[in-house]
Image (cartoon, rainbow, N blue to C red):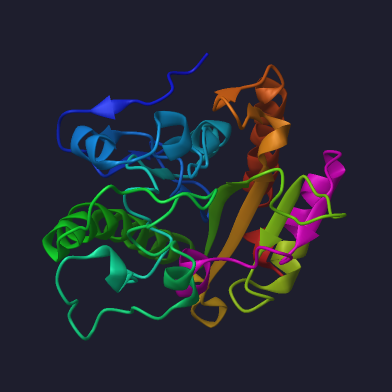
Amino acid sequence: MDLPLPVSPDPIAPLRLCCPEIQTVPLVFASPHSGRDYPVDFVADARLDPLSLRRSEDSFVDELFAAAPAHGAPLLAATFPRAFCDPNREPWELDPTMFEEELPPWVNTSSPRVGAGLGTIARVVASGESIYRRKLRFVEAENRVNGLWQPYHDALRDLIAATRRRFGICLLIDCHSMPANGLGRGCSADFVLGDAHGTACAPHATRRVEQLLSGLGYAVRRNDPYAGGYITRHYGRPREGVHAIQIEIARSLYMDEVHICKLPRFAALQRDLTRLVAMMAEAGSGLLAA
């Protein structure tokens, strides 16, 4: 069984980047929410038990796509947990009720994500329980954004730019997972692909990824209820040759959500996603050809 909470007494390295010796395909894979290095001070400040903190993670998603470099594409993963700092938000989406002092006027305090308690610095975990015992200081948010959020996005931006320079185009696959109750009553799917309703990625490319997953035997939905977060919408600019798809994987396919551990069928899903990566790599630029 996986450890309930990996606690880090040292400063967190913000990301892990695995690159092929030579990038051979115009693909970039990224996992912003699979980080699981928990700062010891953060754990001490939390009013929640370790497993509750971990329920905000997209646990093990980086491992599911670990074969990307072997097929010629880089894989970027955040190492810090989403509950500590969320790289799939604007850099300054902050809830003013969480802080001791008044926030600067340029901070976005009114986004729907902030209202839900899930800003750049989350107030609650995914299950809705409050994280902190105390109010934070704004300098703590600055340290997290500048030391974790920014390096992750610098690396992602550089990967996208380098891919576009090399191939003329880039397809970013932003990898996530969704809870068992994430689709609502009466709905089911193994995967949800989000392209911001066709604005972040050429629709034919999204359709091709959907066909590949369906061909592997999985039920796939598109943009409902996950159309793509900040990363998909911010980096997906098809007119500039950069396309982005968010992929949400049902956690029930591979993990026990209560104990945050892999199920025996994890290996089968990993093999299928390795096949998906291989097929996407084989298609290469053809994925984006109309």
Above or below residue 189? Residue 223 is: below
Name the quadrant containing residue 101: bottom left
User: Residue at position x 17%, y 77% from top?
Assistant: 102
Queried whether the magenta region covers residue 209, the answer comes back as: yes
102 or 22: nearer the eye?
102
User: Residue 56, percent across and down?
Assistant: 48, 45
Left or right of 73 in this view: 251: right
The quadrant in which the C terminus is found is bottom right
User: Residue 220, percent across and down?
Assistant: 80, 52
User: Residue at position x 49%, y 75% from top?
Assistant: 112
Queried whether the magenta region covers residue 253, the answer comes back as: no
User: Residue at position x 37%, y 70% from top?
Assistant: 90
Residue farthest along the bottom direction in this orientation:
105
154 or 90: nearer the eye?
90
User: Residue 190, percent across and down?
Assistant: 77, 44
User: Residue at position x 23%, y 84% from top?
Assistant: 106
Above or below residue 289? Residue 39 is: above
Q: How many marks?
A: 0
Give the residues drawn in magenta, as a range.
Answer: 208-234
Q: Is residue 107 visible?
A: yes
Left or right of 92 in this view: 175: right
51 or 199: nearer the eye?
51
Q: Is residue 284 visible?
A: no
Above or below residue 170? Residue 240 is: below
User: Residue 141, percent across and down?
Assistant: 21, 60
Residue farthest along the top direction in this orientation:
1
Left or right of 171 in this view: 220: right
Left or right of 191 in this view: 274: left
Above or below residue 70? Residue 94 is: below
